[in-house]
Amino acid sequence: MKDINLFRTKDSIFLKKTKSKSEISKEDDCDGYLIEASENEARKIVASLEGKGKIVAVVGGDNVFNRRAVETLKVDYLVSPERGLKKDGLKQRDSGLNHVVAKEAAKRGVVVVVDFGEVSRLVGKAKALRLERLIQNIKICRKAKCPIKIVSFAKNGKGVVDEKGLSSFGVSLGMSSEQSRDAVRF
């Protein structure tokens, strides 16, 4: 597998974006689900998917949501924990991830995912703040030995980024060459 996308392609994982339990059906021809919902709704969706062999990815939120998602939900991927409006300190960014969450994610086998497609669409100060938070999360994940992946989450063929582009993005954020190579392979 080379990437995670929101449409079916050869050699990629196809996730269906869902916000409620009612959007899930038995006829879905997808490899898993990308859950973008509140904590209560995410719990209902994860409970309904248990035992079906589907990949479960949860879009991150604030620090409390990210910690509960990693500790109590049976998820495979925590997508963009740095997302959302957060209050930054003077010397540290509120990146949605700290050493406790990263260690727990490493222990439970939860992979932190960077959404390259969303970052590339940002402009100006919003992009700079997101990149700062990503750099901090990469450092935290490296110390905690938590796996981190970079994916494009493309909705169509135009948004797909090749493996070399994703790897070079990882190196530019401060990943080692080995870490960036592992971040784009599934």
Image (cartoon, rainbow, N blue to C red):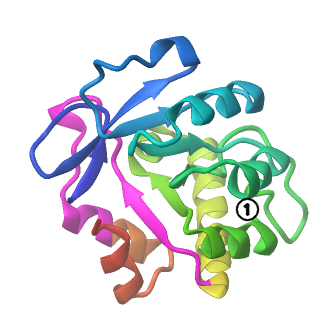
Instruction: Locate residue 144, reporting x and y percent.
Output: 66, 83
Q: Is residue 36 left or right of residue 70?
A: left
Residue at (49% x, 69% y) in the render: 148
Label 1: which residue? 97
Vertical position of residue 184 compared to residue 56: above or below: below
Residue at (41% x, 50% y) in the render: 116
Vertical position of residue 34 compared to residue 74: above or below: above
Residue at (62% x, 42% y) in the render: 126
Q: Is residue 111 left or right of residue 62?
A: left
Residue at (41% x, 39% y) in the render: 52
Vertical position of residue 101 compared to residue 33: above or below: below
Instruction: Locate residue 53, reporting x and y percent.
Output: 38, 45
Query: Circle 1 sits in a helix, a strand or a loop, which is it?
Result: loop
Q: Is residue 162 left or right of residue 183?
A: left
**148 drawn magenta:** yes
Three-letter amino acid code of the residue under disc 1: Leu
Instruction: Locate residue 92, reporting x and y percent.
Output: 83, 68
**For the view shown, which residue lies furthest in the top direction?**
22
Magenta residues, as a range?
145-167
Q: Quadrant of residue 151?
A: bottom left
Q: Quadrant of residue 99?
A: bottom right
Quadrant (top left/top right/bottom left/bottom right) for the C terminus: bottom left
Q: Bin the neighbour count of mark 1 within 10 Å (Cα to Cα): few under 14, some 14-19, many 20 and up.
A: many
**For the view shown, which residue lies furthest in the right direction?**
90
Q: Is residue 109 left or right of residue 94?
A: left
Q: Could you say which is closer to the camera, residue 51 or residue 173?
A: 51
Instruction: Locate residue 5, reporting x and y percent.
Output: 29, 40
**For the view shown, which residue lies furthest in the left direction?**
10
**89 drawn magenta:** no
